[in-house]
């Protein structure tokens, strides 16, 4: 009946834990990867967006006559006319649901503009150039209003109001932490107060955003292609603002050329492009240009802190007043990032008394957009500066002050003063490995020797705790996800998952998991992501959730399918089901080693459903959701909630040499010891970590978005916004430590976010250390040469 | 409109372009090869890199008309019938890309480098790829890939020669006309 053989089964090791090569790599390497701008549809037209040139003004008149006469133009849409067809864009995270303030966000401004760059009108034309040319001809008449660009200024009683229905410019005001900070400071041997500023930087993926929408007049359905992170959420958002049924919208995620949070949904152009297609009856494509991409801010905060420590280096209390400048309100999730800056404070240190007060304020700058780190990065910068300042104030070694304050390895799960329940870790272990990798004592000696020659070597350490796989009740930030595993009757497997990839490679990781759980080779597996008609509902990518939730749900679904294969395979081998193994494409009788190939078993399930597969439901398919543990939204006795299942951690060490004459910083060495729990694919984890570290180095040294006094972006190209290039970087060294999480499927914790905050802090700490002979104090990032020279000057004049 | 003749990956194309059409747009939209990417249009990111008569060029920084008569190699022209080009292979083996958006620039720049320097040191590698931005990898794996490609090609792997040095490039065969 079947070809039961005992032929040698080619056995390879488990896929999980191997550096399996990237899925679909050949497609990208040969230029066949389809990014959003690579899609064309018959009759496709192009959109260009007319943007406000002023930071704050009433719109008196939008004159579209000349633009309408321009060659190739099909439609010129103003805010007023858009509002007749489209409602507000739903928020990815509604501030009101977090105790903050709501305001309508529309695809085109109605009545007034609140930042330079805000979309006020749109043009659809036959070609991209025609659309851009016509956009230049739209005349907007403004009545200027006073504007405010600085976060502190926006809090002043007489500050211009962005949203007139609000009493002030505060989106969210909140208090965090527990303990008696006053008493702690009172008892401390050392008390330091200072101010730290984190300038606005941005994510800058090399592929900007883009969308292609196609309205079908006959079917009344909408198909949207995009460079996206959250396709199902986009479908819901567009359905809401355009008043369509969700089932009439099909969202297809193109290959994404990097994202880092930028391509989370809620951007005005998403709704806009869909509306333009609906109004013109033609497919409409809009691709962001680099200038536009630079409008998206990633972070901008001021921290005014006071810290108290005992003589032995123990930090006993921290107070931090945070003002986060979120720019204008967007429906994207960026405004919520500073919440995590406050919540992550005190990081992996046992500081019993922490009080943070956060004002997230709006200004007439473009909105912040979600960014890798999601606010946690700023907490790390502040905390790691604080630890170094304490060490300096007490004359202790910064490595030892970290060790003194770390949560001890045996004390997990550990509830922090702000309520985070850290699942696991070994922070002193990370430090030991980093110091060994640096040869720390020898390095300190070399530093002392170089100082005698007038050279300025600096060593900067930074610890980073990365809460991952967040869940936010009532928002699109969800801690679970869904995967379908489907096997055909030839044994081929397709995995449809709700998590998406921004390019990092979680599809490969998910295939590895399904390979092991289902017992088929990687080459039999295809992973489908980002398609709302094919994939089960899910939440896409953010918060390092891809492998925790996508991997977990894929494992559960694969196990369900495997169980049927095992049952029928065992019958074909005429042994009890508990005496077979399913692996590497075969069902194998453990006793005598006879095997039956999985494709034959799969065929039997379907074609012999009433014979050998009797009483087995003949569907080789399962859809499962995975909810990790540890998430707890019931406030504890101190009102703290716990929105993360798991916490990755890492320790960074930067070695720099600073030229005190030119202010130039040369990065000589960089070590990161990383703990993301169980590693599904080391090469993919490392790739993500390198990318995040370099992004943090950029934010620490050179990356700064600059606006002129009128709120217009001055740093609008890669010549004025400086990303690190290959020649700026040493060989970054990465080491792993594995402390599995007890709350996720494999003990994996999430990778991809860790790196930004720690690297930013490590280079800043290293620069201060290098310039210790001058007595400088680093109070801001980034630190390009002029900022370094200013630090030296400031210290000299003291 | 201007008539422009381009030999792209061995195949002749005659296209009509405006005088201000950038080479990158001509390649993507008129020739129809979308493997060459646009990241900035200001000559800073390198995602649009192609080889024009063997030299790496940022195709957003030249007009299509100025490339009239040129031989152009794009990312689509690297692999042959026998499989990936050794530089592509090395990039895959070393995980030297994530999203792959920077790949056209990284691959073609590497091909050009190895064409003139079979044993580049780290400084030469950095210098070559310094004009190409990658936001995903942090460049470490890209450097390793360039080194691996150089080693494999130096070891005399017959397939491992840069395209310009192969006796006959399979991709240079014109396809049967439709
Ligand atoms: S698109 Fe040509 S250099 Fe960026
Ligand atoms: S791999 Fe994404 S930009 Fe290089």
Image (cartoon, grey):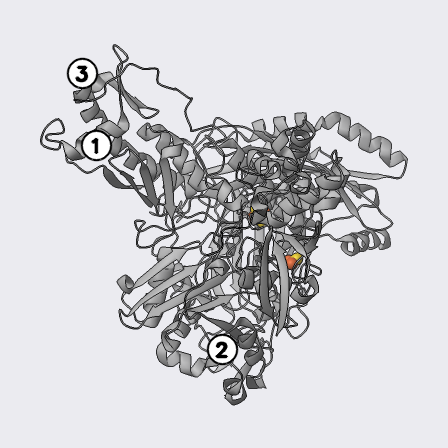
Q: Is residue B20 above or below residue A315?
A: below
User: Would you call the spot at circle 2 few (<14 residues within 10 Å), some (14-19), or many (20 or more)?
Assistant: many
Inspect this view and state whether residue A431 appears.
Answer: yes
**Residue A123 disc label:** 2
User: Would you call the spot at circle 3 few (<14 residues within 10 Å), some (14-19), or many (20 or more)?
Assistant: some
For label 1, the SS is: helix
User: Would you call the spot at circle 1 few (<14 residues within 10 Å), some (14-19), or many (20 or more)?
Assistant: some
Q: Is residue A235 above or below residue A759?
A: below
Pointers 2 and 1 in contact (CB under 8 A)?
Answer: no
Residue on which disc 1 sits: A603
For label 3, the SS is: loop
For label 2, the SS is: strand
Q: Chain of mark 3?
A: A
**Residue A282 disc label:** none
* Camera-nearest label, 3 or 1: 1
Return the x and y of residue A529 as percentages of the image width and height.
38, 48
Nearest the viewer among B143 and A31 is A31
Mark nearer the N terminus (3 vs 1): 3
* Residue located 60% across and 80% down the image: A146
On the rendered structure, is A561 left or right of A747? left
Task: State the separation of the CA atoms marked 2 and 1.
Answer: 55 Å
Q: Residue furthest right?
A: A453
Both on one chain, marks 3 and 2? yes
Mark nearer the N terminus (3 vs 2): 2
Q: Is residue A78 above or below residue B51?
A: below
Tell me which image quadrant ligand 1 sits in.
bottom right
Q: Residue furthest top?
A: A592
């Amino acid at each position: 009946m079947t070809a039961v053989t005992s032929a040698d089964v080619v056995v390879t090791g488990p896929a999980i834990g191997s550096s399996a090569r990237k899925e679909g790599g050949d497609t990208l390497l040969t230029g066949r990867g389809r990014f959003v701008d690579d899609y064309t549809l018959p009759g496709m037209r192009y959109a260009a967006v007319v943007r406000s040139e002023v930071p704050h003004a009433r719109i008196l008149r939008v004159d579209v006559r000349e633009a309408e006469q321009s060659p190739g133009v099909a439609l010129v849409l103003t805010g007023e006319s858009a509002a007749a067809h489209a409602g507000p864009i739903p928020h990815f995270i509604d501030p009101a649901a977090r105790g903050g303030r709501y305001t309508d966000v529309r695809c085109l401004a109605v009545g007034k503009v609140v930042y330079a760059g805000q979309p006020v009108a749109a043009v659809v034309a036959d070609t991209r150039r025609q659309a851009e040319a016509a956009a230049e001809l739209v005349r907007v008449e403004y009545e200027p209003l006073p504007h405010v660009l600085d976060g502190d200024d926006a809090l002043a009683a007489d500050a211009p109001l962005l949203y007139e229905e609000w009493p002030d410019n505060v989106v969210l005001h909140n208090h965090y932490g527990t303990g008696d900070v006053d008493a702690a400071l009172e008892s401390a041997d050392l008390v330091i107060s200072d101010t730290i500023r984190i300038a606005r930087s941005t994510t800058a993926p090399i592929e900007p955003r883009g969308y292609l929408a196609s309205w079908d007049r006959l079917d009344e359905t909408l198909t949207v292609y995009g460079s996206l992170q959250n396709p199902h959420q986009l479908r819901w958002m567009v359905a809401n603002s355009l008043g369509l049924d969700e089932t009439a919208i099909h969202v297809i995620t193109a290959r994404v050329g990097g994202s880092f949070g930028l391509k989370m949904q809620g951007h005005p152009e998403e709704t806009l492009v869909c509306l333009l297609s609906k109004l013109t009856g033609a497919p409409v494509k809009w691709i962001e240009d680099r200038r536009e991409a630079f409008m998206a801010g990633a972070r901008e905060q001021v921290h005014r802190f006071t810290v108290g420590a005992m003589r032995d280096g123990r930090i006993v209390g921290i107070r931090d007043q945070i003002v986060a400048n979120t720019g204008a309100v967007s429906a994207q999730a960026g405004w919520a990032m500073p919440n995590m800056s406050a919540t992550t404070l005190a990081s992996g240190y046992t500081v019993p008394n922490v009080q943070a007060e956060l004002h997230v304020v709006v200004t007439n700058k473009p909105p912040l957009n979600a960014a890798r780190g999601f606010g946690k990065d700023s907490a790390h910068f502040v905390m790691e500066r604080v630890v170094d300042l304490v060490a300096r104030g007490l004359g202790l070694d910064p490595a030892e002050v970290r060790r003194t304050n770390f949560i001890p390895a045996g004390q997990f799960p550990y509830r922090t003063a702000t309520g985070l329940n850290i699942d696991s870790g070994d922070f002193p272990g990370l430090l030991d490995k980093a110091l060994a990798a640096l040869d720390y004592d020898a390095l300190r000696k070399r530093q002392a020797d170089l100082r005698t020659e007038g050279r300025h070597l600096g060593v900067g350490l930074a610890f980073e705790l990365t809460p991952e796989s967040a869940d936010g009740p009532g928002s699109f930030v969800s801690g679970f996800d869904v995967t379908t595993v489907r096997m055909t009757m030839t044994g081929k497997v397709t995995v449809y998952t709700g998590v998406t990839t921004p390019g990092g490679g979680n599809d490969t990781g998910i295939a590895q998991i399904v390979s092991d759980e289902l017992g088929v080779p990687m080459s039999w597996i295809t992973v489908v992501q980002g398609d709302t008609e094919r994939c089960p509902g899910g939440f896409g990518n953010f918060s390092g959730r891809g492998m925790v939730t996508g991997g977990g749900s894929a494992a559960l679904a694969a196990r369900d399918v495997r169980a049927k294969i095992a049952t029928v395979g065992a019958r074909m081998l005429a042994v009890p089901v508990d005496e077979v193994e399913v692996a590497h494409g075969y069902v194998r009788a453990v006793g005598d080693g006879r095997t039956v190939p999985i494709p034959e078993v799969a065929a039997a399930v379907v074609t012999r459903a009433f014979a050998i597969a009797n009483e087995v439901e003949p569907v080789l398919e399962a859809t499962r959701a995975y909810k990790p543990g540890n998430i707890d939204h019931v406030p504890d006795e101190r009102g703290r909630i716990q929105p993360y299942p798991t916490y990755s951690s890492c320790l960074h060490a930067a070695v720099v040499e600073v030229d005190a004459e030119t202010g130039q910083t040369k990065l000589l060495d960089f070590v990161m010891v990383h703990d993301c729990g169980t590693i599904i694919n080391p090469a993919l984890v490392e790739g993500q970590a390198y990318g995040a570290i370099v992004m943090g180095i950029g934010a620490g040294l050179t990356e700064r978005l600059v606006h002129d006094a009128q709120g217009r972006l001055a740093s609008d190209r890669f010549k004025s916004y400086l990303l690190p290039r290959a020649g700026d970087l040493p060989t970054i060294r990465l080491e792993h430590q594995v402390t599995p999480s007890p709350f996720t499927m494999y003990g994996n914790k999430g990778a991809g976010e860790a790196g930004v905050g720690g690297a930013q802090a490590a280079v800043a700490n290293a620069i201060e250390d290098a310039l210790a002979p001058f007595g400088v104090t680093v109070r801001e990032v980034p630190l390009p040469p002029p900022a370094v020279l200013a630090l030296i000057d400031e210290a000299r004049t003291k | 409109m201007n008539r422009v003749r381009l030999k792209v990956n061995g195949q002749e194309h005659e296209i009509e372009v405006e005088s201000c059409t950038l080479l990158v747009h001509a390649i993507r939209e008129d020739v129809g090869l979308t493997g060459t990417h646009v990241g900035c249009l200001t000559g800073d990111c390198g995602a649009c890199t192609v080889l024009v008569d063997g030299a790496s060029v940022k195709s957003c920084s030249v007009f299509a008309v100025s490339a009239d008569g040129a031989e152009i190699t794009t990312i689509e022209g690297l692999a042959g019938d026998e499989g990936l080009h050794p530089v592509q292979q090395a990039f895959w083996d070393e995980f030297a890309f994530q999203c792959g958006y920077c790949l056209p620039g990284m691959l073609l720049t590497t091909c050009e480098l190895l064409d003139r320097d079979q044993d580049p040191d780290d400084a030469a590698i950095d210098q070559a790829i310094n004009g190409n931005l990658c936001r995903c990898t942090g460049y470490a794996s890209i450097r390793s890939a360039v080194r691996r490609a150089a080693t494999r090609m130096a070891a005399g792997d017959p397939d491992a020669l840069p395209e310009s040095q192969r006796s006959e490039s399979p991709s240079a065969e014109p396809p049967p006309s439709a």
